[in-house]
Amino acid sequence: QKEVEQNSGPLSVPEGAIASLNCTYSDRVSQSFFWYRQYSGKSPELIMSIYSNGDKEDGRFTAQLNKASQYVSLLIRDSQPSDSATYLCAVNMNDYKLSFGAGTTVTVRA
Amino acid sequence: DGGITQSPKYLFRKEGQNVTLSCEQNLNHDAMYWYRQDPGQGLRLIYYSQIVNDFQKGDIAEGYSVSREKKESFPLTVTSAQKNPTAFYLCASSRTTWGTGGDEQYFGPGTRLTVT
């Protein structure tokens, strides 16, 4: 079983819609959870971090964490063409190791 | 203007040659990391360093070497022993390796290495 798994995608949403990205992880002791956005040919950019159960909102982004279900998600509201990118879920499994999912590619169609 | 710089952006080498990738940060972060990304795949950890003069192997350290002589700098050498060196190499840093808020990792722009 992979340590961090994401929807394989690609995910295509119309402009203005909500894009929903899901991520599950294998290690119950994980404490830190991150979402990165990566445009084609560029490096990952941190967009959200979440450490406790529940929702965390930042602008049009909402991260949701459920440690009991080992599940973290990212919602992108009012999706814009500029949101078209690959989104990487990352989980801090240990005191140093950030494990990444393979990413979900999102395309927002105008 | 704080950040992480990597150089060069693109690097081309012949098989059998060692090559060193540069990573510098002025964020005053203690921890630094090297990842490798292959097309369609997630990031894999090569080496990490929690403090100056100390570093640890990640998941795919074979064929790579690092040094951490200064807090700001964490160069990666790709040796001829690395069987498939062509990849996108990413350097990252964080304040700490663990703890709420401290372990957020920030990435440099990356170096795209092609070995033929």
Image (cartoon, grey):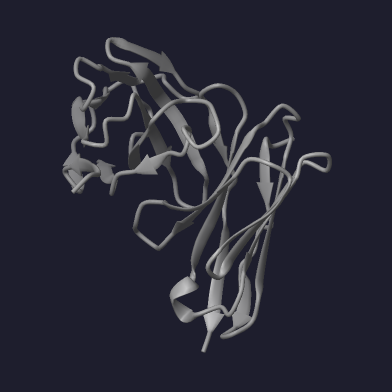
Q: Is residue A18 above or below residue B64?
A: below
Q: Is residue B10 left or right of residue A61?
A: left
Q: Position of residue A41 (x, y in %)?
A: 35, 59
Image label count: 0
Q: Position of residue A27 (x, y in %)?
A: 72, 30
List the single residue furthest toward the bottom: A110
Looking at the rendering, in which quadrant would you find the C terminus of chain B? Answer: top left
Question: Residue A96 placed where, x, y %?
Answer: 51, 24
In terms of image quadrants, where is residue B50? top left
Residue drawn at 48 percent across, 72 percent down: A83
A64 sits to left or right of B102: right
Q: Is residue A75 left or right of residue B73?
A: right
Residue nearer the viewer, A74 or A89? A74
Q: Place residue B62 in its image quadrant.
A: top left
Residue found at x 27% / y 46%: B112
Residue A61 sits above or below residue B31 on the image: below
Point out residue B90 in the picture as x, y percentages from the top left corner. 34, 40
Looking at the image, residue A67 sits to the left or right of residue B95; the answer is right
Q: Nearer the viewer, residue A106 or A67?
A: A67
Res B67 → quadrant: top left
